[in-house]
Image (tube, rainbow, N blue to C red):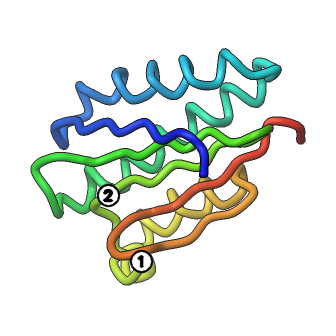
C-alpha cells in the first residue's frame, strides 16, 4: 500500500485551488508531461464540481493515492444515483470518464484513476 494524502476543503468553489495545488505537488515528483498533469488537475476539478453541485456535505474530503506511474483520488459527496438522474451532472461525469483510465463510485465517493504514461 502506498502513501495517502488527505485533504478536506469547505464545499465552496473558492477552495478548489487548494486541491489543485496539492495534486500538482504530488504529481510534480513524477516523470509526467504537462498535458497529463493538466488532465489530472481537470479530473480533480470536475470531480469536486460534481460534489459542489450535489451539496450533500459542508466539506469535501479528498484522498490522493500516488502509485508507481499513476494516481488515484477519491472525492466525497458524490452519489452515482444522483449523477445518473441529472443530465447536467451526467455530462460532467462523461468528461471525467473520457479523461480517466478508471472511474467508479464507492459509498458516496467518486474514485478516479489516471496513469501518467498514456
In percent of the image, x 43 and y 74: which residue is there? 106
Residue 8 left/right relative to 64? left
The numbered disc on residue 76 is: 2
Residue 50 left/right relative to 70? left
The residue tagged 1 is: 80
Between disc 2 and disc 1, the foreground one is 2
Q: Quadrant of the C terminus?
A: top right
Near mark 1 (Cα within 10 A), the count class, few <14, some 14-19 or many ≥20, is some
Quadrant in the rendering for residue 15: top left
The numbered disc on residue 92 is: none
Label 1 element class: helix
Quadrant in the rendering for residue 68: top right
Q: Is residue 47 above or below residue 26?
A: below
Give the total number of marks visible in the rendering.
2
Residue 42 left/right relative to 50? right
In percent of the image, x 45 and y 50: which residue is there? 47
**Camera-nearest residue between 27 and 39:** 27
Near mark 2 (Cα within 10 A), the count class, few <14, some 14-19 or many ≥20, is many
Q: In this view, which residue lies farthest toward the left?
A: 58
Q: Locate residue 116, reporting x and y percent.
A: 80, 36
In percent of the image, x 65 and y 42: which residue is there? 71
**Camera-nearest residue between 37 and 74:** 74
Q: In this view, which residue lies farthest toward the front?
A: 1
Label 2 element class: strand
Quadrant in the rendering for residue 12: top left
Q: Locate residue 56, reporting x and y percent.
A: 17, 63
In percent of the image, x 53 and y 62: which residue is there? 93
Amino acid at each position: 500500500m502506498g502513501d495517502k494524502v488527505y485533504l478536506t476543503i469547505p464545499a465552496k468553489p473558492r477552495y478548489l485551488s487548494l486541491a489543485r495545488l496539492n495534486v500538482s505537488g504530488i504529481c510534480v515528483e513524477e516523470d509526467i508531461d504537462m498535458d497529463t498533469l493538466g488532465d489530472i488537475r481537470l479530473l480533480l476539478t470536475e470531480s469536486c464540481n460534481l460534489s459542489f453541485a450535489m451539496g450533500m456535505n459542508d466539506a469535501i474530503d479528498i484522498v490522493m493515492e500516488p502509485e508507481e506511474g499513476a494516481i488515484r483520488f477519491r472525492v466525497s459527496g458524490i452519489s452515482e444515483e444522483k449523477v445518473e438522474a441529472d443530465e447536467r451532472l451526467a455530462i460532467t461525469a462523461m468528461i471525467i470518464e473520457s479523461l480517466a483510465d478508471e472511474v467508479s463510485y464507492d459509498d458516496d465517493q467518486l474514485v478516479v484513476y489516471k496513469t501518467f504514461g498514456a
